[in-house]
Image (spheres, rainbow, N blue to C red):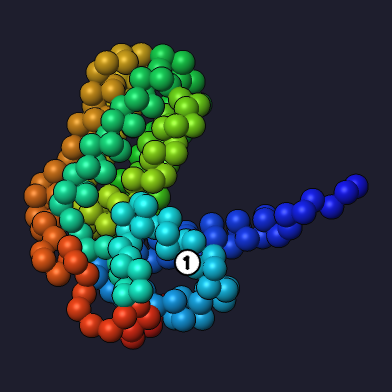
Amino acid sequence: MPVPESRGLVSRSLLRENAYRVIRDAIVDGTLAPGERLNDPDLVEWLGISRTPVREALGRLEQAGLVRTKPGRYTIVSPLDSRAERAAQSVTAAMHQLAVREALPDLSAAELDAMREANARFARALADSDVDAALAADDAFHDVAVTASANPAVRSVLDQFTPVLRRVERLRFGSLGGRGSVAQHELIIALCAAGDVDAAAAAVHANWQTLAPLLDAVPLPDQEDRHGPAGPGEGGRGRSAP
């Protein structure tokens, strides 16, 4: 067959996607701390790829609100910002509420069982103080309705905004306050099983609103956060990448 003029698109796309996910996860789990400089040479060495997919991944992370860049000066991990976190919470809560509305009343018995199983894993993880497992189980619980809604727009928006909230979610699930979500999940399951669309959607929205007390403790960015760190230009030495 004729060889297309554009070559290497798949591998480049995969490199960019993998770089995005690895850097994103390091930001979310705190390996790369808020305000930390992200230096291209360190990231290239850490990820074992060229600079181009690294810069593309950083651009996507900036769009997601996890990275801030001043061209020619610096790239840093975005500091926690109550305005950005609240905006992400509002959008995320609305998308999960919409997913439940679109998934019901046709949610199957198997899907309800999947929600119950995920919530059981969630409860065990919280009891064991395993934040990573709790986050994975919570994702699995909410993902049942998102998948059942078959709405790609909901999935796309959640993929963009959920990581912004993840740093705050880690704080919640690392505390005793996070254990209240188990009972909230049980209520959501019961309302979904009953086919009560309005009540189930409201319960999902209320579940995401439980992050509000933690958001109250997130500071507004100070002057340095808004204008970036002082110091040498982009690529100035910060802590090396993991």
Side of 71 relative to 217 (left or right): right
Residue 4: percent from the left, percent from the top? 79, 51
User: Could you tell me if residue 201 is visible in this image?
Assistant: yes
User: Could you tell me if residue 238 is visible in this image?
Assistant: no
Side of 171 relative to 120 (left or right): left
> Residue at coordinates 25% horizontally, 67% vertically from top-left?
34
Identify which amino acid the numbered label 1 is placed on: Arg
Residue 69: percent from the left, percent from the top? 33, 65
> Residue at coordinates 23% horizontally, 83% vertically from top-left?
231
Q: Is residue 192 above or below residue 56?
A: above
| Number of residue marks | 1
Residue 108: percent from the left, percent from the top? 49, 20
Q: Based on the displayed image, in which of its 4 quarters is residue 61 positioned? A: bottom left
User: Regarding mark 1 in the picture, which secondary structure is present there?
Assistant: helix
Q: Is residue 151 above or below residue 6?
A: above
Instruction: Return the residue at label 1.
Output: 55
Q: Based on the displayed image, in which of its 4 quarters is residue 193 positioned? A: top left
Seen from the viewer's position, the closer of residues 126 and 87 is: 87
Side of 235 relative to 91 (left or right): right
